Amino acid sequence: MSNRRKFIQQVGVLAGAFSTNSLFNQLHAESFENAIQNKKHLSASALATDEDYWSIIQQSYTVNPNIIILNNGGVSPAPRLVQEALDRYNKLCNEGPSYYMWRILDQGREPLRQKLADLAGCDAEEIAINRNSTEALNTIIYGLNLKAGDEVIGTKQDYPNMIQAYKQRALREGIVYKQISFDFPIENDETIVKEFEKNITSKTKIIHVTHMINWVGQIMPVKKIADMAHKYGIEIVCDAAHSFGLLEYKIPDLHCDYWGTSLHKFLSAPIGSGLMWIKKDKIEKIWPLTCNGEPQSSNIRKFETLGTRSFAIEQAIGEAVNFQNGIGSKRKEERIRYLKNYWAEKVKNISKVKLHTSLKEAYSCAICGVSIDGMKPQELDAALMNDYKIHTVGIVWENISCVRVTPHVYTTLKDLDKLVKAIEEIASRKK
Protein backbone atom coordinates (compact mmCIF):
# COMPACT_ATOMS: atom_id res chain seq x y z
CA MET A 1 0.00 0.00 0.00
CA SER A 2 2.84 2.35 0.84
CA ASN A 3 4.42 1.77 -2.60
CA ARG A 4 1.06 2.31 -4.31
CA ARG A 5 0.50 5.55 -2.37
CA LYS A 6 3.95 6.75 -3.32
CA PHE A 7 3.34 5.90 -6.96
CA ILE A 8 0.07 7.86 -6.98
CA GLN A 9 1.83 10.82 -5.38
CA GLN A 10 4.55 10.72 -8.01
CA VAL A 11 2.01 10.61 -10.82
CA GLY A 12 0.38 13.71 -9.30
CA VAL A 13 3.73 15.50 -9.17
CA LEU A 14 4.45 14.62 -12.79
CA ALA A 15 1.11 16.00 -13.97
CA GLY A 16 2.17 19.16 -12.18
CA ALA A 17 1.42 22.56 -13.61
CA PHE A 18 -0.37 21.09 -16.61
CA SER A 19 -3.24 19.53 -14.71
CA THR A 20 -6.28 20.57 -12.70
CA ASN A 21 -4.34 19.30 -9.72
CA SER A 22 -1.60 21.92 -10.15
CA LEU A 23 -0.12 23.51 -7.05
CA PHE A 24 -1.62 26.81 -8.11
CA ASN A 25 -5.09 25.28 -8.14
CA GLN A 26 -4.44 23.67 -4.77
CA LEU A 27 -2.97 26.72 -3.04
CA HIS A 28 -4.19 29.90 -4.71
CA ALA A 29 -6.94 29.50 -7.29
CA GLU A 30 -9.80 29.83 -4.80
CA SER A 31 -8.34 32.74 -2.82
CA PHE A 32 -7.38 34.63 -6.01
CA GLU A 33 -10.87 34.14 -7.41
CA ASN A 34 -12.50 35.26 -4.17
CA ALA A 35 -10.27 38.33 -4.05
CA ILE A 36 -11.28 39.45 -7.52
CA GLN A 37 -14.89 38.28 -7.41
CA ASN A 38 -16.51 41.68 -6.76
CA LYS A 39 -13.84 43.66 -8.61
CA LYS A 40 -13.89 42.20 -12.09
CA HIS A 41 -15.61 45.35 -13.34
CA LEU A 42 -12.54 47.40 -12.42
CA SER A 43 -9.97 48.26 -15.05
CA ALA A 44 -6.43 47.05 -14.50
CA SER A 45 -5.30 50.58 -13.61
CA ALA A 46 -8.16 50.99 -11.11
CA LEU A 47 -7.42 47.63 -9.50
CA ALA A 48 -3.76 48.64 -9.19
CA THR A 49 -4.62 50.82 -6.18
CA ASP A 50 -6.78 48.25 -4.38
CA GLU A 51 -4.66 47.22 -1.39
CA ASP A 52 -7.11 44.54 -0.22
CA TYR A 53 -6.76 42.66 -3.49
CA TRP A 54 -2.97 42.93 -3.66
CA SER A 55 -2.54 41.89 -0.05
CA ILE A 56 -3.70 38.41 -1.13
CA ILE A 57 -0.99 38.32 -3.81
CA GLN A 58 1.64 39.57 -1.34
CA GLN A 59 0.91 36.69 1.02
CA SER A 60 1.99 34.26 -1.70
CA TYR A 61 5.65 35.27 -1.28
CA THR A 62 8.14 34.33 1.45
CA VAL A 63 10.46 37.35 1.34
CA ASN A 64 12.54 38.22 4.39
CA PRO A 65 10.58 40.75 6.50
CA ASN A 66 13.81 42.23 7.87
CA ILE A 67 14.98 43.58 4.50
CA ILE A 68 13.01 45.61 1.98
CA ILE A 69 14.00 44.12 -1.37
CA LEU A 70 13.84 46.74 -4.14
CA ASN A 71 16.26 45.21 -6.61
CA ASN A 72 13.78 42.95 -8.37
CA GLY A 73 15.24 44.09 -11.67
CA GLY A 74 18.21 41.87 -10.93
CA VAL A 75 16.33 38.75 -9.93
CA SER A 76 12.92 38.30 -8.33
CA PRO A 77 11.92 35.86 -5.60
CA ALA A 78 9.64 33.03 -6.61
CA PRO A 79 6.26 32.74 -4.88
CA ARG A 80 5.83 29.91 -2.41
CA LEU A 81 4.10 27.56 -4.86
CA VAL A 82 7.01 27.79 -7.33
CA GLN A 83 9.44 27.02 -4.52
CA GLU A 84 7.34 24.02 -3.49
CA ALA A 85 7.13 22.76 -7.06
CA LEU A 86 10.89 23.09 -7.42
CA ASP A 87 11.41 21.21 -4.15
CA ARG A 88 9.05 18.39 -5.18
CA TYR A 89 10.68 17.94 -8.59
CA ASN A 90 14.16 18.10 -7.10
CA LYS A 91 13.34 15.44 -4.49
CA LEU A 92 11.80 13.25 -7.18
CA CYS A 93 14.91 13.57 -9.35
CA ASN A 94 17.10 12.49 -6.47
CA GLU A 95 15.09 9.31 -5.95
CA GLY A 96 16.66 8.09 -9.16
CA PRO A 97 18.14 10.83 -11.40
CA SER A 98 18.76 8.89 -14.57
CA TYR A 99 15.22 7.52 -14.50
CA TYR A 100 13.11 10.40 -13.21
CA MET A 101 15.07 13.09 -15.09
CA TRP A 102 15.54 11.53 -18.49
CA ARG A 103 12.50 9.28 -18.76
CA ILE A 104 9.87 11.13 -16.72
CA LEU A 105 10.46 14.85 -16.21
CA ASP A 106 11.95 15.23 -19.68
CA GLN A 107 8.49 14.37 -21.03
CA GLY A 108 7.18 17.59 -19.49
CA ARG A 109 9.17 19.89 -21.76
CA GLU A 110 6.67 19.88 -24.61
CA PRO A 111 3.65 20.76 -22.41
CA LEU A 112 5.79 23.48 -20.84
CA ARG A 113 6.81 24.77 -24.25
CA GLN A 114 3.15 25.10 -25.21
CA LYS A 115 2.28 26.77 -21.90
CA LEU A 116 5.01 29.36 -22.40
CA ALA A 117 4.01 29.86 -26.04
CA ASP A 118 0.43 30.57 -24.96
CA LEU A 119 1.67 33.22 -22.54
CA ALA A 120 4.02 34.70 -25.13
CA GLY A 121 1.38 34.63 -27.89
CA CYS A 122 3.54 32.73 -30.34
CA ASP A 123 3.97 29.34 -31.99
CA ALA A 124 5.42 26.73 -29.65
CA GLU A 125 7.75 25.72 -32.49
CA GLU A 126 9.46 29.11 -32.16
CA ILE A 127 10.62 28.94 -28.54
CA ALA A 128 13.49 27.18 -26.78
CA ILE A 129 13.77 26.83 -23.00
CA ASN A 130 17.14 27.66 -21.49
CA ARG A 131 18.74 29.28 -18.44
CA ASN A 132 18.70 33.07 -18.86
CA SER A 133 18.79 36.04 -21.22
CA THR A 134 22.54 35.82 -21.70
CA GLU A 135 22.31 32.23 -22.91
CA ALA A 136 19.33 32.99 -25.16
CA LEU A 137 20.80 36.10 -26.73
CA ASN A 138 24.36 34.81 -26.96
CA THR A 139 22.99 31.79 -28.80
CA ILE A 140 21.45 34.17 -31.32
CA ILE A 141 24.41 36.58 -31.50
CA TYR A 142 26.99 33.83 -32.05
CA GLY A 143 24.60 31.89 -34.30
CA LEU A 144 24.01 34.69 -36.81
CA ASN A 145 25.64 34.20 -40.20
CA LEU A 146 27.74 37.35 -40.15
CA LYS A 147 31.03 37.81 -41.96
CA ALA A 148 33.90 40.28 -41.79
CA GLY A 149 32.69 43.78 -42.62
CA ASP A 150 29.03 43.15 -41.72
CA GLU A 151 27.73 45.78 -39.33
CA VAL A 152 25.71 45.49 -36.13
CA ILE A 153 24.21 48.55 -34.43
CA GLY A 154 23.62 48.52 -30.70
CA THR A 155 23.77 51.06 -27.90
CA LYS A 156 26.15 51.81 -25.06
CA GLN A 157 23.20 51.35 -22.71
CA ASP A 158 22.63 47.69 -23.68
CA TYR A 159 23.41 44.89 -21.23
CA PRO A 160 27.18 44.16 -20.89
CA ASN A 161 26.95 40.45 -21.72
CA MET A 162 25.39 41.23 -25.08
CA ILE A 163 27.84 44.05 -25.79
CA GLN A 164 30.76 41.73 -25.05
CA ALA A 165 29.33 39.03 -27.33
CA TYR A 166 29.31 41.41 -30.30
CA LYS A 167 32.77 42.71 -29.40
CA GLN A 168 34.09 39.17 -29.30
CA ARG A 169 32.71 38.50 -32.77
CA ALA A 170 34.30 41.74 -33.96
CA LEU A 171 37.65 40.77 -32.45
CA ARG A 172 37.61 37.22 -33.76
CA GLU A 173 35.77 37.50 -37.07
CA GLY A 174 36.02 41.12 -38.12
CA ILE A 175 32.36 42.15 -37.95
CA VAL A 176 31.81 45.86 -37.28
CA TYR A 177 30.03 46.61 -34.01
CA LYS A 178 28.76 50.18 -33.75
CA GLN A 179 27.30 51.63 -30.55
CA ILE A 180 25.14 54.71 -30.35
CA SER A 181 24.43 56.44 -27.04
CA PHE A 182 21.26 57.88 -25.52
CA ASP A 183 20.68 60.25 -22.64
CA PHE A 184 17.67 58.82 -20.84
CA PRO A 185 14.89 59.48 -20.11
CA ILE A 186 13.61 60.15 -23.62
CA GLU A 187 9.89 60.74 -24.12
CA ASN A 188 9.83 60.72 -27.91
CA ASP A 189 9.92 57.47 -29.89
CA GLU A 190 10.94 59.19 -33.11
CA THR A 191 14.09 60.57 -31.48
CA ILE A 192 15.18 57.02 -30.75
CA VAL A 193 14.14 55.56 -34.12
CA LYS A 194 15.89 58.32 -36.08
CA GLU A 195 19.11 57.85 -34.12
CA PHE A 196 19.24 54.19 -35.16
CA GLU A 197 18.27 55.02 -38.73
CA LYS A 198 20.95 57.65 -39.28
CA ASN A 199 23.64 55.11 -38.33
CA ILE A 200 22.54 52.55 -40.93
CA THR A 201 24.84 51.89 -43.87
CA SER A 202 24.70 49.46 -46.78
CA LYS A 203 26.66 47.01 -44.62
CA THR A 204 24.27 47.02 -41.64
CA LYS A 205 22.76 43.56 -41.06
CA ILE A 206 21.53 43.63 -37.46
CA ILE A 207 20.10 46.15 -34.99
CA HIS A 208 20.18 45.08 -31.35
CA VAL A 209 17.47 46.66 -29.18
CA THR A 210 16.94 46.31 -25.43
CA HIS A 211 13.17 46.40 -24.88
CA MET A 212 13.51 47.80 -21.36
CA ILE A 213 16.87 49.34 -20.50
CA ASN A 214 17.99 47.49 -17.39
CA TRP A 215 19.82 50.45 -15.87
CA VAL A 216 16.94 52.96 -15.72
CA GLY A 217 13.85 51.21 -17.10
CA GLN A 218 13.41 53.19 -20.34
CA ILE A 219 10.98 51.34 -22.61
CA MET A 220 12.33 51.33 -26.16
CA PRO A 221 10.01 51.45 -29.21
CA VAL A 222 11.00 48.02 -30.52
CA LYS A 223 8.17 47.72 -33.04
CA LYS A 224 8.88 51.13 -34.59
CA ILE A 225 12.60 50.40 -34.78
CA ALA A 226 11.88 46.99 -36.32
CA ASP A 227 9.50 48.39 -38.93
CA MET A 228 12.08 51.00 -39.90
CA ALA A 229 14.92 48.48 -40.04
CA HIS A 230 13.00 45.96 -42.13
CA LYS A 231 12.63 48.55 -44.87
CA TYR A 232 16.41 48.34 -45.22
CA GLY A 233 16.48 44.53 -45.05
CA ILE A 234 17.93 44.65 -41.52
CA GLU A 235 17.01 42.13 -38.79
CA ILE A 236 16.21 42.94 -35.16
CA VAL A 237 17.57 41.17 -32.08
CA CYS A 238 15.51 42.07 -29.00
CA ASP A 239 16.75 41.78 -25.42
CA ALA A 240 13.53 41.35 -23.41
CA ALA A 241 15.14 40.40 -20.10
CA HIS A 242 13.13 42.96 -18.13
CA SER A 243 9.93 43.22 -20.14
CA PHE A 244 8.59 39.66 -20.23
CA GLY A 245 6.29 38.85 -17.33
CA LEU A 246 6.02 42.57 -16.63
CA LEU A 247 4.57 44.29 -19.70
CA GLU A 248 1.50 42.79 -21.34
CA TYR A 249 2.48 42.03 -24.93
CA LYS A 250 2.86 39.17 -27.36
CA ILE A 251 6.28 38.56 -28.88
CA PRO A 252 5.11 38.80 -32.52
CA ASP A 253 3.65 42.24 -31.73
CA LEU A 254 7.21 43.59 -31.45
CA HIS A 255 7.95 42.71 -35.12
CA CYS A 256 11.46 41.59 -34.12
CA ASP A 257 13.24 38.60 -35.63
CA TYR A 258 15.04 37.24 -32.58
CA TRP A 259 14.21 37.63 -28.88
CA GLY A 260 15.43 36.39 -25.50
CA THR A 261 14.47 36.78 -21.85
CA SER A 262 15.08 35.60 -18.30
CA LEU A 263 12.12 34.01 -16.56
CA HIS A 264 13.49 34.57 -13.05
CA LYS A 265 12.85 38.29 -13.18
CA PHE A 266 9.25 39.53 -13.33
CA LEU A 267 7.70 36.16 -14.14
CA SER A 268 9.09 34.93 -10.79
CA ALA A 269 10.10 31.54 -12.18
CA PRO A 270 12.95 29.59 -10.55
CA ILE A 271 16.35 31.26 -10.58
CA GLY A 272 18.26 30.11 -13.64
CA SER A 273 15.45 29.85 -16.19
CA GLY A 274 15.11 31.59 -19.53
CA LEU A 275 13.46 31.59 -22.93
CA MET A 276 14.53 32.22 -26.52
CA TRP A 277 12.27 32.99 -29.47
CA ILE A 278 13.25 32.93 -33.12
CA LYS A 279 10.86 33.73 -35.94
CA LYS A 280 10.01 30.40 -37.53
CA ASP A 281 11.41 31.05 -40.98
CA LYS A 282 14.77 32.11 -39.51
CA ILE A 283 15.48 29.14 -37.22
CA GLU A 284 17.38 27.09 -39.79
CA LYS A 285 19.94 29.82 -40.46
CA ILE A 286 20.94 30.28 -36.80
CA TRP A 287 23.72 28.01 -35.60
CA PRO A 288 23.29 26.46 -32.12
CA LEU A 289 25.68 27.72 -29.46
CA THR A 290 26.16 24.14 -28.20
CA CYS A 291 26.60 21.12 -30.45
CA ASN A 292 23.71 19.49 -32.27
CA GLY A 293 23.54 16.70 -34.81
CA GLU A 294 21.50 18.85 -37.21
CA PRO A 295 22.75 22.41 -36.63
CA GLN A 296 21.08 23.79 -39.76
CA SER A 297 17.66 22.26 -39.16
CA SER A 298 14.50 24.34 -38.69
CA ASN A 299 13.68 22.54 -35.41
CA ILE A 300 13.85 24.95 -32.46
CA ARG A 301 14.89 22.05 -30.22
CA LYS A 302 18.38 22.10 -31.72
CA PHE A 303 19.09 24.95 -29.28
CA GLU A 304 18.27 22.77 -26.26
CA THR A 305 21.20 20.34 -26.57
CA LEU A 306 22.52 21.36 -23.16
CA GLY A 307 23.36 17.96 -21.72
CA THR A 308 22.45 17.47 -18.07
CA ARG A 309 20.61 20.45 -16.62
CA SER A 310 18.08 21.08 -13.87
CA PHE A 311 14.87 19.37 -14.92
CA ALA A 312 13.39 20.47 -11.60
CA ILE A 313 13.91 24.16 -12.41
CA GLU A 314 12.53 23.65 -15.88
CA GLN A 315 9.31 21.98 -14.76
CA ALA A 316 8.68 24.44 -11.92
CA ILE A 317 8.43 27.21 -14.55
CA GLY A 318 4.94 25.92 -15.28
CA GLU A 319 3.67 26.96 -11.85
CA ALA A 320 5.13 30.44 -12.34
CA VAL A 321 3.07 30.72 -15.52
CA ASN A 322 -0.02 29.56 -13.60
CA PHE A 323 0.66 32.25 -10.99
CA GLN A 324 1.06 34.90 -13.70
CA ASN A 325 -2.19 33.88 -15.37
CA GLY A 326 -3.94 33.79 -12.00
CA ILE A 327 -3.17 37.47 -11.54
CA GLY A 328 -3.47 38.57 -15.17
CA SER A 329 -0.63 40.16 -17.12
CA LYS A 330 -2.25 43.56 -17.53
CA ARG A 331 -3.24 43.76 -13.87
CA LYS A 332 0.31 42.90 -12.87
CA GLU A 333 1.80 45.49 -15.21
CA GLU A 334 -0.45 48.25 -13.90
CA ARG A 335 0.17 47.36 -10.25
CA ILE A 336 3.95 47.44 -10.60
CA ARG A 337 3.79 50.69 -12.58
CA TYR A 338 1.62 52.15 -9.82
CA LEU A 339 4.17 51.10 -7.19
CA LYS A 340 7.00 52.71 -9.14
CA ASN A 341 5.09 55.95 -9.58
CA TYR A 342 3.93 55.87 -5.94
CA TRP A 343 7.40 56.41 -4.51
CA ALA A 344 8.89 58.30 -7.45
CA GLU A 345 6.18 60.97 -7.44
CA LYS A 346 6.79 61.53 -3.74
CA VAL A 347 10.55 62.08 -4.04
CA LYS A 348 10.86 63.89 -7.36
CA ASN A 349 10.47 67.36 -5.84
CA ILE A 350 12.70 66.79 -2.80
CA SER A 351 15.69 69.11 -2.84
CA LYS A 352 18.86 67.50 -4.26
CA VAL A 353 16.92 64.44 -5.52
CA LYS A 354 16.89 63.60 -9.23
CA LEU A 355 14.97 60.93 -11.13
CA HIS A 356 16.59 59.30 -14.16
CA THR A 357 13.45 57.66 -15.52
CA SER A 358 10.29 58.97 -17.17
CA LEU A 359 7.11 58.54 -15.16
CA LYS A 360 4.95 58.41 -18.28
CA GLU A 361 3.24 55.08 -18.97
CA ALA A 362 4.67 54.67 -22.47
CA TYR A 363 8.26 54.96 -21.31
CA SER A 364 8.56 53.11 -18.00
CA CYS A 365 6.95 50.55 -15.73
CA ALA A 366 8.85 49.00 -12.80
CA ILE A 367 12.41 50.30 -12.84
CA CYS A 368 13.27 53.85 -11.82
CA GLY A 369 16.66 55.45 -11.27
CA VAL A 370 17.22 57.99 -8.48
CA SER A 371 20.20 60.01 -7.29
CA ILE A 372 21.03 62.61 -4.65
CA ASP A 373 23.32 65.50 -5.51
CA GLY A 374 26.73 65.09 -3.93
CA MET A 375 26.41 61.33 -3.42
CA LYS A 376 27.87 58.55 -5.51
CA PRO A 377 25.41 55.73 -6.33
CA GLN A 378 27.37 53.32 -4.17
CA GLU A 379 27.11 55.73 -1.23
CA LEU A 380 23.35 56.09 -1.57
CA ASP A 381 22.96 52.34 -2.02
CA ALA A 382 25.02 51.73 1.13
CA ALA A 383 23.11 54.33 3.15
CA LEU A 384 19.76 52.79 2.21
CA MET A 385 20.94 49.34 3.24
CA ASN A 386 22.97 50.17 6.33
CA ASP A 387 20.61 52.72 7.85
CA TYR A 388 17.20 51.55 6.62
CA LYS A 389 17.62 47.90 5.55
CA ILE A 390 16.47 48.77 2.02
CA HIS A 391 18.25 46.78 -0.70
CA THR A 392 18.69 48.52 -4.06
CA VAL A 393 21.64 48.61 -6.47
CA GLY A 394 24.02 51.40 -7.41
CA ILE A 395 24.46 51.87 -11.17
CA VAL A 396 27.50 53.47 -12.82
CA TRP A 397 27.53 52.62 -16.52
CA GLU A 398 28.54 54.86 -19.41
CA ASN A 399 26.52 58.09 -18.94
CA ILE A 400 24.23 56.64 -16.25
CA SER A 401 24.88 57.23 -12.55
CA CYS A 402 22.06 56.47 -10.12
CA VAL A 403 20.52 53.94 -7.77
CA ARG A 404 18.06 51.56 -9.42
CA VAL A 405 14.84 50.90 -7.50
CA THR A 406 12.56 48.09 -8.64
CA PRO A 407 9.43 46.97 -6.74
CA HIS A 408 7.42 43.82 -7.49
CA VAL A 409 3.88 42.66 -6.75
CA TYR A 410 4.84 41.58 -3.23
CA THR A 411 6.11 45.10 -2.39
CA THR A 412 3.85 46.97 0.03
CA LEU A 413 3.06 50.67 0.21
CA LYS A 414 4.47 50.60 3.75
CA ASP A 415 7.81 49.49 2.29
CA LEU A 416 7.74 52.30 -0.25
CA ASP A 417 6.83 54.86 2.41
CA LYS A 418 9.99 53.79 4.23
CA LEU A 419 11.96 54.30 1.02
CA VAL A 420 10.55 57.80 0.57
CA LYS A 421 11.34 58.68 4.18
CA ALA A 422 14.87 57.32 3.79
CA ILE A 423 15.56 59.33 0.62
CA GLU A 424 14.16 62.47 2.23
CA GLU A 425 16.33 62.05 5.32
CA ILE A 426 19.48 61.18 3.40
CA ALA A 427 18.99 64.15 1.04
CA SER A 428 18.45 66.52 3.99
CA ARG A 429 21.83 65.53 5.40
CA LYS A 430 23.69 66.59 2.26
CA LYS A 431 24.96 70.17 2.29
Image: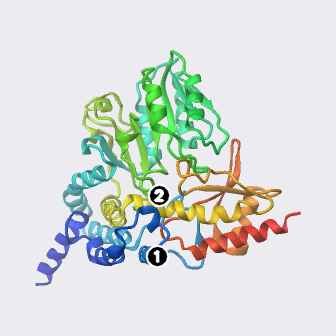
Q: Mark 2 — residue?
A: 265
Residue 7 rendering spot, x and y as whole percentages: 15, 74
10 Å neighbourhood of mark 2: few (<14), some, or many (≥20)? many
- Residue drawn at 38 percent across, 33 percent down: 257
Kindly indicate whether the residue at mark 1 contacts the one at mark 2 (C-beta within 8 angstroms): no
- Toward the top, the furthest residue is 202
Residue 306 rendering spot, x and y as whole percentages: 34, 46
**Quadrant that contains the C terminus:** bottom right
**Quadrant that contains the N terminus:** bottom left
The answer to which of 58 and 397 lies nearer the viewer is 58
Q: Mark 1 — residue?
A: 62
The answer to which of 127 and 426 lies nearer the viewer is 426
What element does badge 2 sit on?
Answer: loop
Callout 1, which amino acid? Thr
- Residue drawn at 44 percent across, 58 percent down: 264
- Residue drawn at 39 percent across, 48 percent down: 249
10 Å neighbourhood of mark 1: few (<14), some, or many (≥20)? few
Callout 2, which amino acid? Lys
Q: Is residue 369 left or right of residue 139?
A: right
Q: Quadrant of residue 374?
A: bottom right
Q: Quadrant of residue 22?
A: bottom left
What element does badge 1 sit on?
Answer: loop
Residue 288 rendering spot, x and y as whole percentages: 35, 35
Q: From where the camera sits, is residue 271 visible?
A: no
Disc marking residue 34? none
Q: Is residue 249 left or right of residue 169?
A: left
3 versus 396 height, above or below: below
- Residue drawn at 34 percent across, 76 percent down: 38
354 versus 346 height, above or below: above
Task: Report how far apart the C-alphas of labels 2 and 1 lie in the structure.
Answer: 16 Å
Precedes in sequence: disc 2 or disc 1: 1
